[in-house]
Image (cartoon, grey):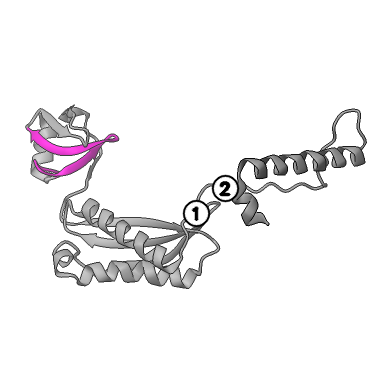
């Protein structure tokens, strides 16, 4: 009860806020001196004794922020990708429907990381409380379309193998030359069978 009283006096959170307590988050549906109840995104009601609350993340107090790390492939034009990422956010900020939700011009921080998958661009968008998810979803949708139009590629998992010496495939009992001739013969026969099954592909090949 003392902890619940301190929560109320210090205005740590209130009913209607979205908070995270010990990794469990949701909308505060009810709170009193003894208990706090959260409704998570799956609709489950989570009851937390106020005595168990030590650290609280309030996602809806005063203002919120969209913090996005946009990963692009190394093959892209970096300056073009940065420019498009910022322009899409600025366009949303200037539109009346989104201007009410976005409090300040977006902050483009540029290259945030050079990782294995690609280059991470960091952008911040300051928004009204509880609007960070709606703004982020719309921004991602628009950015995907803008990247497609500009030919900016988003990386996908891939792996490159490097060998210090050339690889040789060898069939037991055959010399390297005999193995090579056998593999070439098998490849030729496979191509011939494919042409027999697909006359259209045969015409295109010829």
Q: Quadrant of residue 187?
A: top right
Give residue 36's position: percent from left, percent from top.
13, 32
Give residue 6's position: percent from left, percent from top.
12, 38
Is residue 126 shown left or right of residue 176?
Answer: left
Q: CA distance from mark 1 to mark 2?
A: 9 Å
Is residue 74 shown left or right of residue 135?
Answer: right
Secondary structure of the residue carrying numbered label 1? loop
Give residue 144's position: percent from left, percent from top.
36, 59
Q: Quadrant of residue 18?
A: top left
- Majority secondary structure of the magenta segment? strand
Q: Which residues are magenta?
A: 12-31
- 148 within the magenta span: no
Q: Nearer the viewer, residue 58 or 182?
A: 182
Q: Taking the image as drawn, is residue 17 in sight?
A: yes
Is residue 114 shown left or right of residue 110?
Answer: right
Q: Nearer the viewer, residue 124 or 33?
A: 124
- 16 within the magenta span: yes
Label at residue 155 = 1
Which residue does the image show at 55% across and 63% down from the upper left?
75
Q: Nearer the viewer, residue 131 or 163?
A: 163
Dot 2, how many residues are within 10 Å of its Cα: few (below 14), some (14-19), or many (20+)? few
Residue denoted by label 2 = 158
Do callouts 1 and 2 mark residues in contact (Cβ within 8 Å)?
yes
Dot 1, how many residues are within 10 Å of its Cα: few (below 14), some (14-19), or many (20+)? some
> Quick check: 194 above or below 1?
below
Give residue 68's position: percent from left, percent from top.
35, 56
Q: Nearer the viewer, residue 23 or 195?
A: 195
* Quadrant where the C terminus is found in the figure: bottom right
């Amino acid at each position: 009860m003392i902890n619940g009283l301190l929560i109320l006096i210090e205005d740590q959170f209130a009913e209607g806020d979205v908070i995270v307590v010990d990794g469990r988050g949701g909308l505060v549906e009810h709170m009193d001196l003894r208990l706090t109840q959260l409704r998570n995104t799956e609709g489950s009601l989570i009851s937390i004794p106020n005595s168990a609350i030590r650290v609280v993340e309030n996602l809806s107090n005063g203002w919120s922020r969209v913090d996005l790390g946009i990963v692009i492939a190394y093959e892209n034009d970096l300056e073009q990708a940065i420019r498009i990422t910022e322009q899409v956010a600025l366009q949303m900020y200037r539109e009346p429907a989104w201007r009410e939700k976005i409090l300040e011009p977006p902050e483009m921080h540029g290259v945030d990381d050079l990782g294995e998958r690609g280059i991470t661009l960091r952008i911040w968008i300051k928004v009204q409380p509880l609007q960070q998810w709606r703004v982020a979803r719309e921004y991602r949708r628009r950015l995907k379309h803008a990247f497609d139009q500009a030919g900016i590629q988003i990386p996908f998992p891939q792996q490159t193998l490097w060998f210090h010496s050339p690889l040789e495939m060898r069939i037991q009992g055959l010399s390297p030359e005999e193995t090579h001739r056998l593999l070439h013969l098998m490849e030729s026969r496979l191509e011939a069978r494919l042409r027999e099954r697909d006359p259209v592909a045969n015409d295109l090949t010829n």
